[in-house]
Image (cartoon, rainbow, N blue to C red):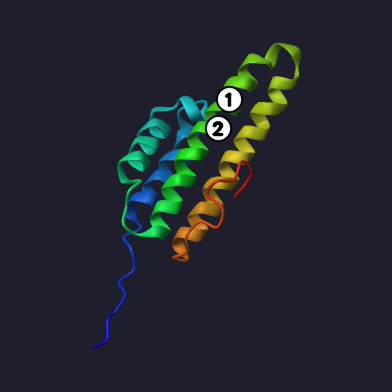
Amino acid sequence: MNYIETPPDKTWPMIVYVLYLASFLNGIFSFSITAVIGVIIAYVNATDPDERLRSHYRFQIRTFWIGLLYAVVGSMTVLIGIGVLILIWAVVWFIIRCVKGMVALNEGRAHPDPGSWLFG
């Protein structure tokens, strides 16, 4: 008997990546309502039966919280000068993570390193 493996529905994880990137339109990324909605969607779907999608949700959840950490540390250190560099790093880091995640998702791959602190 032949079974045809159906590809997982990539709609929700793609929506999360798009919401994360759209959060730059609303202000500081981790404090934006679109990023909060994105992480809520990721948490709701984090138990997806497909391992590939679970890896993306884990990556998205970590991207939100690590990005929030970078934003808080950067904001707290702006007055001593290094905060601006941290915030610039956080923006670049956030965009690269989202783009890499979107590429892996479009190719139907699990995220290669969802536990990464860097770019994944």
Q: Percent position (x, y) of residue 88?
A: 66, 31
Q: Residue at x 75, y 13 (%)?
A: 80
Name the outermost residue toward the left.
1
What residue sits 69% from the left and 23% below the top? 84
Estimate how packed mark 1 is, as few (under 14), some (14 to 19) or many (20 or more) residues with alpha carbons within 10 Å. many
Front one among 41 and 32: 41
Mark 2 highlights which residue? 67
Name the residue that disc number 1 marks. 71
Which residue is at the far front? 1
Q: Nearer the viewer, residue 88 or 115?
A: 115
Tell me the SS state at disc 2: helix
For the point 34% across and 35% down, the residue is: 40
- Look at the numbered discs 2 and 1 and tell me whether their residues touch, using CB distance below 8 Å: yes
Work out whether 49 lies above or below 95.
below
Mark seen at residue 3: none
Relative horizontal placement of residue 80, taking residue 34 as reference (left or right): right
In the drawing, does residue 93 fall left or right of residue 24? right
Q: Which residue is drawn at the image coordinates 39% and 31% (left, top)?
A: 36
Q: Position of residue 116 (x, y in %)?
A: 59, 45
Marks 2/1: CA–CA distance: 6 Å
| Farthest residue, direction top | 79
Disc 1 marks a residue whose amino acid type is Ala
Residue 18 in the image: x percent, y percent?
42, 45
| Quarter containing the N terminus | bottom left
102 and 39: which one is in front?
39
Most foreground residue, 110 or 75: 110
Q: Is residue 98 left or right of residue 83?
A: left
- The image shows residue 95, relative to residue 111, as above or below, that is above
